[in-house]
Image (tube, rainbow, N blue to C red):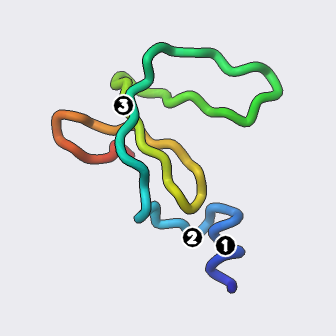
């Protein structure tokens, strides 16, 4: 129960469960009041944590997340 509460606040999430890598087709600027965060990276690939929803850049050549 405590772990779920900490994951809700993204304090204890280890990002073990992630999606498959996605490719961003183009850079889109979010609206001012949007909760959507674009991936800030030189690569256009990213993965999303299934527990907390955070996005991470993904290095396709090394097949791993960039933290």
Q: CA distance from mark 2 to mark 3?
A: 25 Å
- Whether pointer 2 and pointer 1 mark residues with C-beta atoms closer than 8 Å, the reply is yes
Instruction: Say what secondary structure mark 2 lies in.
Output: loop
Q: Residue at x 50, y 54 (%)?
A: 49
Q: CA distance from mark 2 to mark 1?
A: 5 Å
Q: CA distance from mark 1 to mark 3?
A: 28 Å
Disc 3 designates what residue? 45
Q: How many marks?
A: 3
Q: Residues within 10 Å of mark 1 (few under 14, many from 20)?
A: few
Q: Residue at x 58, y 15 (%)?
A: 28
Q: Earlier in the sequence, mark 2 or mark 3?
A: 2
Question: Residue 29: where, in percent of width, then height?
Answer: 63, 16
Q: Residues within 10 Å of mark 3 (few under 14, many from 20)?
A: some
Disc 2 designates what residue? 12
Horizontal arrangement in the rendering, residue 29 relative to residue 57 (left or right) = right
Disc 1 designates what residue? 6
Instruction: Say what secondary structure mark 1 lies in.
Output: helix
Observer-nearest residue: 53 or 10? 53
Q: Earlier in the sequence, mark 1 or mark 3?
A: 1
């Amino acid at each position: 129960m405590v772990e779920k509460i900490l994951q809700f606040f993204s304090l204890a999430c280890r990002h073990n469960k992630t999606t498959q890598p996605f490719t961003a087709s183009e850079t889109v600027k979010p609206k001012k009041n949007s909760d959507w965060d674009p991936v800030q990276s030189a690569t256009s690939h990213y993965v999303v944590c299934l527990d907390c929803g955070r996005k991470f850049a993904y290095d396709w050549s090394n097949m791993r997340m960039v933290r």
